[in-house]
Image: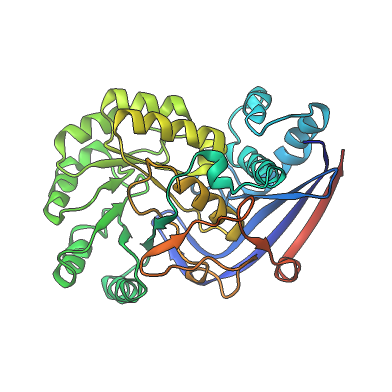
Amino acid sequence: MKIVSVELFVIQMPLRSPFLTHLSTVDTREGIIVKVTNKDGIAGYGEGVAFSSPWYTEETVSTSLHMLTDFLIPLLQKNPINHPENLHSLFNSIRRNHMAKAALETAVWDLFAKIHSQPLSKILGGTHTEIASGVVVATDSASKALKQIEQYLDEGYQRIKVKIHPNQDYFFLTEIRRNYPDIPIMADANSAYSLEDVDRLKALDDFNLLMIEQPLAQDDILEHSILQKELKTPICLDESIVSFDDARKAIEFGSCKVINIKVGRVGGLYEAKRIHDYCLEKEIPVWCGGMIEFGISRAHNIALASLPGFTIPGDISASSRFWEEDIISPEVVVENGFITVPNQPGIGFNVNEKRLNEILLTKKTFQF
């Protein structure tokens, strides 16, 4: 692949409206764009999806920059690779820091696909030509949620995910179901409950939810297996699944009936595909989670979600869901509830250099 440079762009952009969970409120998104260029001038792009503070995982934009600058990029400088899969073993000497690893790894996947003049979706083994799109409602009142749901349904989204916690669950979902008795709804708890809340969680079976996502601790697999036996509603694991081995154990223990795969959370596309392949073999449905991404990560998610095991609409929404203007061209659009999988080489989107520079905070270049 003969990489000659890696560039890091730290960017920041306000969201069109605040994104609320019981853990944090995000109204401005900071992120890292990684550009990897080879000797022929072909460039691949990746995105670091850690947040500015460690509310979702322990990683942040600052820690990702540290890992990329001081460890991951130097490793790549010293160890030329022939295939993006080589990065998985190369980075094994570094514990966790999955989002930093994924930022660089996804850029190399994009470069690899472009070198071979193939869409990234095809390189990964994707079969879908379009993917069903879902969207997240993250607000602090039922009235605001209902207004958002109405808007998103008008825009064609096929599945609604609602953020819940103990102070906002049964009544919240009752109001939504009263107005929308038949739409596909899932609830995302972001670890807001414990096993002491089992009766409260069992009560949510009343709402015919597609699933309840990560109700218990963010690093738990065992107690979710106990809870799943008590619930009719399928449990989906998110934060607990940071590796292939986590997915395997969760399935073997019966901790969940669905898995959310996020490229950044599991360390890149290689590990994400391994999890997908195992879940497909075990007949466990998967869907692609979102991280309030800019367009580059969104494009990688589209490529991943083209794989055959992704049968549930994911958190892959239009660029306009979060941004007045995204950093890719064309922007991601949802038409009749679907997003078309690009058939151009690589991620299939161009980087809007003008927009990137408008929201740029810092930039650093590494020569090979």
User: At which x and y percent is residue 367?
Assistant: 88, 42
**Residue located at (41% from left, 69% from top):** 335
On the rendered structure, is 60 left or right of 73? left
Q: Nearer the viewer, residue 1 or 298?
A: 1
**Residue located at (57% from left, 40% from top):** 123
User: At which x and y percent is residue 249?
Assistant: 36, 24
Does residue 139 sit above or below 50 in this rendering?
A: below
User: At which x and y percent is residue 308?
Assistant: 39, 42
On the rendered structure, is 97 left or right of 363? left
| Quadrant position of residue 87 | top right
**Residue located at (42% from left, 28% from top):** 246
**Residue located at (23% from left, 57% from top):** 169
Does residue 162 sit above or below 93 in this rendering?
A: below
Residue projecting furthest to the right: 367
- Using the rendered image of the protein, determine whether residue 242 is visible from the camera's viewpoint: yes
| Quadrant position of residue 277 | top left
Quadrant where the N terminus sits is top right
Does residue 191 sit above or below 341 in this rendering?
A: above
- Using the rendered image of the protein, determine whether residue 63 is visible from the camera's viewpoint: no
Tally of marks: 0
Quadrant where the C terminus sits is top right
Q: Nearer the viewer, residue 66 or 261?
A: 261
User: At which x and y percent is residue 101?
Assistant: 64, 37
Does residue 17 sit above or below 290 in this rendering?
A: below
On the rendered structure, is 226 left or right of 265? left
| Quadrant position of residue 131 | bottom left
